[in-house]
Image (spheres, rainbow, N blue to C red):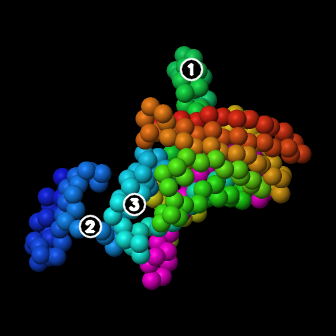
Amino acid sequence: MSSIITQAEEIVQDNGFGDVITLVRGKIEEVELPVQQVDIIISEWMGYFLLYESMLDTVLWARDKWLTKEGLLFPDHATLWVAGIEDGDYKAEKLGYWDNVYGFNFSPIREIAKIEPLVDVVNEQAIMSTAHCILDLDLKTCTKEDLTFESEWAIKATRDDFCHALVAYFDIDFKAAHRTVSFSTGPAAKYTHWKQTVFYMDESLVTCRGEEIKGKISCAPNGKNPRDLDITMDYEFKGEHTKAKNSIQFKMH
């Protein structure tokens, strides 16, 4: 769809592939292809929190319309994970800042900032729990309806620490390749522009190693703008030092 197709056409011609490669510009739902079916679909559709901007919808549409029965998708598998992090300093900077902005009380902005997930780099050392898979997508078989999901999760503290937030990240697999190729957007992996997505809790949980935090996440496209996400995060904790039960509605836009 981008104007970069102009340079792509020049590159195709300059390298002698004008009779092999056909470039088509347009929205995938609107273009006409010179073939009835395709053998391979390659797409970089992933957004923040994997599903933000709802670009996977278009890939599934193309799959159902054009891909042959034995056709291949690249990538073809995705998993979304959640874990706990200690992030007290950053939380105070991000949310506490609005209580005193050069002497003025901007606390109404704090309420807005609190429900908007933070997309940023999380240091691997901040992870204080195990991780739990909250979404597992096989792109060959999943449907648009699967992208609106609800999932229960449970994580265990791996050390005595505070838990200030939950962090979400995703892994991508190319399983249809002759050998599986994968990459992760987690804190322990190399930097990617997707970074990680942080959901701050209202309270700080004081956890001992082995104690469990459990909850449920619900995610759906926003009714007014389907590229945005409405996410509800429920969590419950009964530890030696802290007890908490809460439900927070986040808006990713």
Q: What stretch is highlighted in magenta?
A: 158-181
Under tag 2, what secondary structure? loop
Q: Residues within 10 Å of mark 2 (few under 14, many from 20)?
A: few
Q: Does the magenta stretch include residue 207?
A: no
Badge 1 density bin: few <14, some 14–19, many ≥20, Cα 10 Å: few
Q: In this figure, which residue is indicated by the disc labeled 2? A: 36
Which residue has dot 1 on it? 108
Looking at the image, which residue is at 85% across and 44% down? 238
Give amino acid for label 1: Pro
- Is residue 58 rendered to the left or right of residue 173? left
What residue did someone put label 3 on?
Answer: 64
User: Residue, x 47% and y 46% (percent of image)?
Assistant: 52
Between marks 2 and 1, how big is the CA–CA gap?
55 Å
Residue that appears at 75% across and 53% down:
154
Q: Nearer the viewer, residue 206 or 181?
A: 181
Q: In this view, does 209 lie above or below 113?
A: below
Name the residue type under label 3: Asp
Front in this rendered view, residue 32 or 212: 32
User: How far across and how far down the image is residue 167, in percent?
Assistant: 61, 50
Residue located farthest toward the right when viewing the structure as drawn: 240
> Was residue 160 drawn as part of the magenta stretch in this picture?
yes
Q: Is residue 15 above or below residue 97?
A: below
Figure disc tally? 3
Say which label, 3 or 2, has the lower sequence index: 2
